[in-house]
Amino acid sequence: MTLNWPDDQPILDGETIILRPWRPEDAQAVFEACQDEMVQAFTRVPSPYQLSDAEAFVALGSQLWRQRSDVNCAITDDEDAVIGAISLMHIDEQVAQGEIGYWVADWARGNRVARRAVELLSDWALNELGLSRLLLRIERENVASIAAALAAGAQPTGITVDEEVRDRARNYGIYELLSSAT
Ligand SMILES: CC(C)(COP(=O)(O)OP(=O)(O)OC[C@H]1O[C@@H](n2cnc3c(N)ncnc32)[C@H](O)[C@@H]1OP(=O)(O)O)[C@@H](O)C(=O)NCCC(=O)NCCS
C-alpha cells in the first residue's frame, strides 16, 4: 500500500477550527493546556508537564512528518489561537492503519472542537492520505472522549485492552473509523 504523502503537512480548514502544523511559538499554550488534570489523567503526556515538554513536542512534528510515522496537528480557532491537539500516530503503511489521539484545552471544551477535529483529520487520512482504518484507544471511564469519538462517527470494535500506565490500571475500549472503500 503506497500512501499519498505530500511534501508538506497540509492545513485542514474546517471553518470553525483549523488543523495546522505546530510552530515553536505554540509551546506556551500547549504547556498551559497540559496542566489540566483531565489531559494528565487520560493522555500519555508527561506528568508533571514542563514548558520544556511542550517545546520538545511542538518541535517534533516536522521530523515525524518526514519519517511518515505521525501527523501532529495544532487545533486552532479562527484567530489562530491554539485550542487543542490532534495526532495521527503509529502509521503503518503495510496495513494502511493509524491511531488518532487528541485533547482540547479546558477553556475550549463543549463546543464540538474534538468532534470536528476527528472528523477533519479522519476525512483527510482516509480519503486523501490513503489509510483504510483509524483506531481510537479510549479509557472506558473517559465519557467525554467516548462521546466525542462516537459523535465523529467512530464505531466500537468490541476489543478491550488492559494496561497499567503511571501506576494506574487502565481499561481501554478500541474504536475505529473505516474508509468507505473498506
Ligand atoms: C475528550 C475531549 C477531547 C472532548 O473535547 P470537546 O471539544 O469538549 O468535545 P466535543 O464538544 O467535540 O463533544 C463531542 C460530543 O461529545 C459530547 N460530550 C462532550 N463531553 C461530554 C461529557 N463530559 N459527557 C457527555 N457527553 C459529552 C458532546 O455533547 C458532543 O455531542 P454532540 O456533538 O452530539 O453534541 C476533552 O474533554 C479533553 O480534552 N479531555 C481530556 C483529554 C482526553 O481525554 N483526551 C482523549 C483521550 S482518549
Image: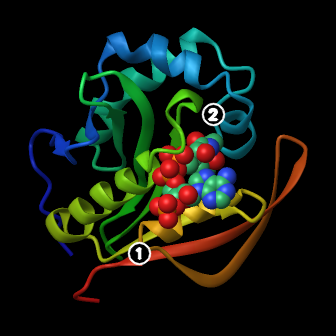
Mark 1 or mark 2: whose residue is earlier in sequence: 2
Q: CA distance from mark 1 to mark 2?
A: 24 Å
In this image, 179 relative to 169: left or right?
left
Dot 2 corresponds to which residue?
45
Q: Quadrant of the N terminus?
A: bottom left
- Residue depicted at x 46% and y 45%: 111
Q: Nearer the viewer, residue 37 or 109?
A: 109
Residue 56 position in % (x across, y down): 47, 19
Name the amino acid, label 2. Val
Q: Is residue 137 visible?
A: no
What SS does tag 1 mark?
strand
Looking at the picture, does residue 19 appear above or below residue 182? above
Q: Which mark is residue 146?
A: none
Residue 162 position in % (x across, y down): 80, 67
- Residue depicted at x 74% and y 20%: 48
Say if mark 1 contacts mark 2, CB within 8 Å. Answer: no
Foreground mark, 1 or 2?
Answer: 1
Report which quarter residue 172 is drawn in: bottom right
**Mark 2 surroundings within 10 Å by alpha-carbon count, few (fewer than 14), some (14 through 19), many (20 or more):** some
Task: Kindly tell me whether mark 1's CB lies below 8 Å from ligand 1.
Answer: no
Report which quarter residue 67 is drawn in: top left
Residue 38 position in % (x across, y down): 71, 38
- Residue depicted at x 12% and y 38%: 8
Dot 1 corresponds to which residue?
177
Q: Is residue 75 visible?
A: yes
What SS does tag 2 mark?
loop
Q: Quadrant of the C terminus?
A: bottom left
Name the amino acid, label 1. Leu
Q: Nearer the viewer, residue 35 or 79?
A: 79
In this image, 81 relative to 102: left or right?
left
- Residue depicted at x 18% and y 70%: 127
